[in-house]
Image (spheres, rainbow, N blue to C red):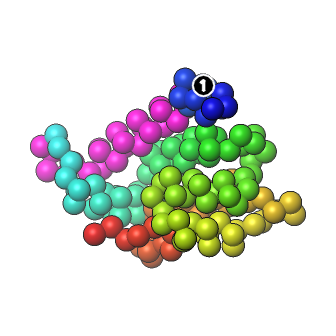
Amino acid sequence: MPASTRLDSEAGLRLTAAADCYWEGMAGLADTDLDGRITRAEFVTAAQAGLHQDPGAFARIALPRHQAVLDVADPDAEQASSTASTVERVLVALGAEPHRARLISAEHRTDPTGRITHEEILREVENYYTTATPQRAFPVPA
């Protein structure tokens, strides 16, 4: 395993910290009955409504996690762009259905080398969290 993907590497430590921040942020939005537990319904409601109502919530809670995932998933992350296959792997790792991830990653080649800029990827992730329109890559939560 390349050093850039090890959890004890700098990128791995950032991913762990960002995942903790994501969970704590979502937990803060989700525990609506303040019983110290988060049900699936509370979490889904927070993800669907909580991040829609607070424009800064995505940047504080979800964006760092997704940036960290890109850093770990792509050995060339310092280029600020990734290949379509890397984006596909990231989408699947985040819960997208593989056939949808393949289609979505293939339609977002935005630079002359066929790479997808991280700015484009993160804009799509933000749309997932902040719009009421179901996104094509991910199944709608039940």
Residue 68 within the segment the image draws in magenta: no
Q: Position of residue 79 (x, y in %)?
A: 78, 45
Residue 15 lies, with reference to residue 105, above or below; the image says above
Residue 115 lies, with reference to residue 8, above or below; the image says below
Say if residue 116 shows up in the picture.
Answer: yes
Main secondary-structure element of the magenta-colored stretch = helix
User: Which residue is at a point 78% across and 58% down the rendered structure image?
Assistant: 115
User: Which residue is at a point 17% across and 43% down the rendered structure image?
Assistant: 37
Q: Which residues are magenta?
A: 13-35
Q: Looking at this view, is 73 or 111 the one in front?
A: 73
Crowding around mark 1 (Cα neighbors within 10 Å: few <14, some 14 to 19, many 20+) is some
Q: Looking at this view, is 25 or 141 the one in front?
A: 141
Q: Position of residue 86 (x, y in %)?
A: 66, 53
Q: Position of residue 59 (x, y in %)?
A: 51, 49
Say whether residue 21 is left or right of residue 28.
right
Exactly how many numbered labels are in the figure? 1
Where the N terminus falls, by quadrant? Answer: top right
Where the C terminus falls, by quadrant? Answer: bottom left
Say whether residue 119 is left or right of residue 19.
right
Q: Quadrant of residue 114?
A: bottom right
Residue at label 1?
A: 9
Say if residue 117 shows up in the picture.
Answer: no
- Amino acid under disc 1: Ser
Q: Position of residue 73 (x, y in %)?
A: 62, 44
Residue 15 within the segment the image draws in magenta: yes
Q: Tell me the SS state at disc 1.
A: loop
User: Which residue is at a point 48% across and 54% down the rendered structure image?
Assistant: 94
Q: Quadrant of residue 109?
A: bottom right
Return the residue found at the far top: 8
